[in-house]
Amino acid sequence: MEVSFNYLRHGGKYILFGCCPPTHQATINPFAVYDKELTVIGVKINPFSFPKALGLLSAMGSRYLNYENLGVKTYALSEYKSALEALKNGSISKAIFKI
């Protein structure tokens, strides 16, 4: 962690996934955090949460996860100009390209 922290650029985010032993210690330079305006985020990962998340997605179904309701539209890669225009004029919020 200490070594990789030095590679962050201005405005960078350091995301620490998972867990280490409770006795582990790491040192970072608080001036580097201030000077580079860095963000440090800890994320707790549970390997058993993925099946539960899939179940929730399935239960929500198209009522909540409908692309059209979310402002998402799928385009062929050759339709990129139309996609950019739709994004520019605000008729969609995200464009997805399929090959």
Image (tube, grey):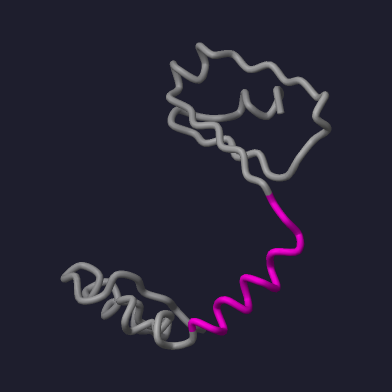
User: Taking 65 as reference, is 6 above or below it?
Assistant: above
Tell me residue 31's x, y (percent). 50, 11
Tell me residue 55's x, y (percent). 62, 79
Tell me residue 87's x, y (percent). 25, 70
Total labels: the figure holds 0
Tell me residue 70's x, y (percent). 33, 76
Name which residue lies at 43% across and 80% down: 65
Name which residue lies at 31% across and 81% down: 69
Judge left or right: residue 39 versus residue 28: left
Name which residue lies at 33% across and 84% down: 68
Q: Residue most toward the left?
A: 89
Query: Could you say which quadrant of the image residue 79 lies in?
Result: bottom left
Residue nearest the observer in this picture, 68 or 21: 21
Residue nearest the observer in this picture, 78 or 41: 41
- Quarter of the picture holding the N terminus: top right
Residue nearest the observer in this picture, 16 or 89: 16
Judge left or right: residue 45 versus residue 99: right
Judge left or right: residue 66 versus residue 38: left
User: Taking 97 as reference, is 41 above or below it?
Assistant: above
User: Taking 17 as reference, is 21 above or below it?
Assistant: above
What secondary structure is the stretch in magenta mostly built from? helix
User: Taking 69 as reference, is 7 above or below it?
Assistant: above
Magenta residues? 45-60
Residue 9 shown in magenta:
no
Name which residue lies at 69% across and 16% down: 27
